[in-house]
Image (cartoon, rainbow, N blue to C red):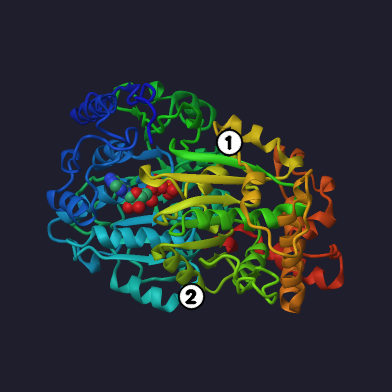
Amino acid sequence: MVEDGGKEAAILFVSSKTKMVKNIQQSMRETKQEVKDGSKVNSGLFASCSFSSLGLDPKLSDQLKERMGFEAPTLVQAQSIPVILSGRDVLVNAATGTGKTIAYLAPIIHHLQGYSPKVDRSHGTFALVIVPTRELCLQVYETLEKLLHRFHWIVPGYVMGGEKKPKEKARLRKGISILIATPGRLLDHLKNTASFVHKNLRWVIFDEADCILELGYGKEIEQIIKLLGSGQNEEGETDDIVPKGVQKQNLLLSATLNDKVNDLAKLSLDNPVMIGLDNSKLQQNLSLPSPASVDPDGDDMIIHVNKSANPSSEDYGIPSQLVQKYVRVPCGARLVALLSVLKNLFEREASQKVVVFFSTRDAVDFHYSLLSQFQWPPNSETEGEETKQLFLKCKTFRLHGSMEQEDRRSAFGTFKTEKQALLLSTDVAARGLDFPKVRCIIQYDCPGEATEYVHRVGRTARIGEKGEALLFLQPIEIDYLKELKKHGASLTEYPLLKVLDKFPLVSNMPRIKKVISLESHPWVISLQRALESCTYAEPKMKNLAKNAFVSWVRGYAAHKGELKSIFVVKKLHLGHVAKSFALREQPSLVGKSHHKESMKEEERRTPKRATS
Ligand SMILES: Nc1ncnc2c1ncn2[C@@H]1O[C@H](COP(=O)(O)OP(=O)(O)OP(=O)(O)O)[C@@H](O)[C@H]1O
């Protein structure tokens, strides 16, 4: 929701004199005026032009509007589409949930549908979209399928880790016009699938570019770029279908950028147009040539997207309507606090979706099992008490990189369509995933880098919708708020005690007149006891808790750089950490049984395996 007319938005520096840029300027002025009039709520997000006015084919514009229900392009789409249509390389940096996927897919489809003779399977792949995770791969593919509804001769496809290679080879042999891929599997096919035709390749897109590199795919990407070749499509190399002399076009997109993107940009972009980047960011974050020096003819452009109407969330483009809170909880009360917050959320509004982020796969597994069987109230055998029910009545899903591919696919797909559900996930769900109607994001374990905070919270408040984000912090971790503030994220405190006070006391709860600390709250004491009983009722559950404890501590010790001074493992009270996994005593961190598990965890933590 926009509070005011937004800060001075739009185009600060545009040296190109094309008509297209003037149209964009005009459209943004109109949008600003509409905000002043109060006639547009989501200013800063939508442009006041139509898809067809951006130069897209009428059938494609119609598909976007009539079939997909997109009334108007978002600002980032209004600014990117004409530039991408023009053939320039582009680096797009715009907030999460602002429609970057359509921004790059629509211009590609526009060009491909216009080829004469018509594109067919024998031409192989024209466009390649590289994404960091399997789920994002499937999601982009789904969007592509919808966009291609009226262009059945353009074939969409995907290849990704976890899928059966022979089947993928067969699909590639038949021919895929627009291919979505995760890096490892793509490289595999480039090297080993002789029937993969890519001589007509015209576009390479790196979606979530910084994440691809953060996950350690730098080497693969270098090899991919080498194998694909770059620059102009040579005569004789391509089929006649690709217009002669057409340059290969590369696009990089992300809501956050880092130094590594600099290298990828240098490697893959030729005189790019920057969308959503300001000069200081260019100089500080990306040591690309300064715009003034790139092209003396004045053909280069920086187009500024008004990423947010809220200046405080400007740095990383956090959606301005997102309500950001933190909850300060002592370690031993973390689990009780999490369950209480969730119960409160679902009781307040039954029909909603919530995502909780954990730092490890073992933590996801433990909490998933616990929530799937933990019942309440604990003493329902007593006469007059209500009968036992699941503590949380909503459907619960889990998602992480060690799950079987089919389970991953089913969790992702079903959570998407559910109206009321809870997803427990590692960062595998943090990037790019578009789950409709997610109302709240809970970061139970701290994300580490501030960029990851931004992507995690970006799973809510998408495309102008409302959303809340809640970050769990122990009192010893409170300095993390300063780290977030450096990047423009300001959080207010969540009233945990008030929420706990709302829960009715059941008969065996201790009656305490004055609650002096969270841990002495009768609700906290009773819930903790009940959770521990649940964990100790089954050896399997206890083992899950122990494994989760061990990998959590290891994960805590793995924080990097400046964050090491905030997340100090020596400051942790391990007994309290154990309590947060519903354990009555602290498991050994070095015991024989855990050594094997720790080794496995180490292996699992290899980022590539976590996602693709
Ligand atoms: N012009 C539009 N009008 C309304 N909805 C749109 C429009 N364009 C895209 N959307 C929808 O907005 C949602 C977010 O789009 P998308 O996933 O492309 O965002 P993103 O900017 O890539 O986000 P992230 O940075 O998190 O990956 C999707 O559900 C998409 O269908």
Q: Residues within 10 Å of mark 2 (few under 14, many from 20)?
A: few
Residue located beneath label 2 in the image: 406
Mark 1 vs mark 2: give the one in front. Answer: 1
In the image, residue 217 sits, relative to residue 15, either above or below, namely below
Residue located beneath label 1 in the image: 491
Say what amino acid the circle numbered 1 marks: Leu
Query: Which quadrant is home to the N terminus?
Result: top left
Element type at marker 2?
Answer: helix
Residue 170: image quadrant is bottom left
> In this image, 373 relative to 345: left or right?
right
> In this image, 409 relative to 107: left or right?
right
In this rendered view, identify the residue nearer to me: 341 or 227: 341
In this rendered view, identify the residue nearer to me: 121 or 236: 121
Q: Cα distance, mark 1 to mark 2?
A: 37 Å
- Rendered residue at 53%/61% (across/down): 423
In the image, residue 277 sits, relative to residue 458, either above or below, namely above
- Rendered residue at 81%/55% (across/down): 576
In this rendered view, identify the residue nearer to me: 493 or 288: 493
- Rendered residue at 83%/65% (across/down): 584
Say what amino acid the circle numbered 2 marks: Glu
Label 2 beta carbon less than 8 Å to ligand 1: no
